[in-house]
């Protein structure tokens, strides 16, 4: 079956540091890939997505590139802020529209001022 | 624009009591609807999904059930709660017609079974 693997953390960085959160996947067919962010006590918000190989998703300074050859979708940001502190989930869907998302376990990111 | 509501936001229930969590979506028609559970320190687990009124698919056998009495309403229920049912329950929707699309999540319900 499908699976997503990501570093769990917590990952602690100083403000303005460079961020990379690794995500690799196993899936049948050609999945769509997503990054979601969850702030404390809230639901998940879609951060960015990519639907085919070599696509780059970007939003709010975050980027991730769909790498089919390495089955990866690493999340990056050049300069993090304290407000980026949250849990980040990598996810995929490879089904025919009705299937749920397959999530990684989430990476807890803590940004210190 | 589309919005998704869940209630209650927080719930504390004793073991053996019934459960009813409700989710409604506004601003769209014929959505796919989903229930996920997020246990403490773990990722999200898909519990149920629905492609239409009265159509429910279960991903994980358990003492929970789901119903979709109206197009934009999705209900999660249990007749007798277990301690292991504690967690954060998230409802989500997606566009039905398009494959491989993103899902949009509600604010969640924090359930504590005591």
Image: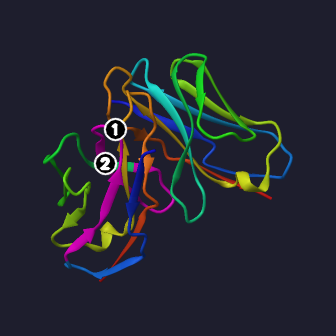
B90 or B12: which is nearer to us? Answer: B90
Q: Which residues are magenta?
A: A18-44
Quick check: is A37 in the magenta stretch? yes
What residue do we see at 27% from left, 38% from top? A30
Residue B30 x/y as whole percent: 43, 18
Q: Look at the image and tell me whether residue A88 can be seen.
A: no
Image quadrant holding the C terminus of chain B, namely bottom right
State the residue position of label 1. B102
Left or right of A72 in this view: B58: right
**Callout 2 crowding tier (Cα within 10 Å): few <14, some 14–19, many ≥20:** many
Quick check: is B72 in the magenta stretch? no
State the residue position of label 2. A34
B83 or B114: which is nearer to us? Answer: B83
What residue do we see at 38% from left, 69% from top? A7
Asked if both marks, 1 and 2, belong to the same chain, the answer given is no
What residue do we see at 25% from left, 56% from top? A73
Image mark 1: chain: B
Residue B98 x/y as whole percent: 31, 24
What's the CA distance linking mark 1 and mark 2?
A: 7 Å
């Amino acid at each position: 079956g499908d699976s997503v693997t990501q570093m769990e953390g917590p990952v602690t960085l100083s403000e303005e540091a460079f961020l990379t959160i690794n995500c690799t996947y196993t899936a049948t067919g050609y999945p769509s890939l997503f990054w979601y962010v969850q702030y404390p006590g809230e639901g998940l918000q879609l951060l960015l997505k990519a639907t085919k190989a070599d696509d780059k998703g970007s939003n709010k300074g975050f980027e991730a590139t769909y790498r089919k050859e390495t089955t990866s979708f690493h999340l990056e940001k050049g300069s993090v802020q304290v407000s980026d502190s949250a849990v980040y989930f990598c996810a995929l869907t490879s089904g025919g529209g009705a299937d749920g998302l397959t999530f990684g376990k989430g990476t807890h990111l803590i940004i210190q001022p | 624009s589309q919005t998704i509501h869940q209630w209650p936001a927080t719930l504390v229930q004793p073991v053996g009591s019934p459960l009813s969590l409700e989710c409604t979506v506004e601003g769209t028609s014929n959505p796919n609807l989903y229930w996920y559970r997020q246990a403490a320190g773990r990722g999200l687990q898909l519990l149920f999904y629905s492609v239409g009124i009265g159509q429910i698919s279960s991903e994980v056998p358990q003492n929970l059930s789901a119903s979709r009495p109206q197009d934009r309403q999705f209900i999660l229920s249990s007749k007798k709660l277990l301690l292991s049912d504690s967690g954060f329950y998230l409802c989500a929707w997606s566009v039905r017609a398009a494959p491989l699309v993103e899902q949009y999540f509600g604010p969640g319900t924090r359930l504590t079974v005591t």
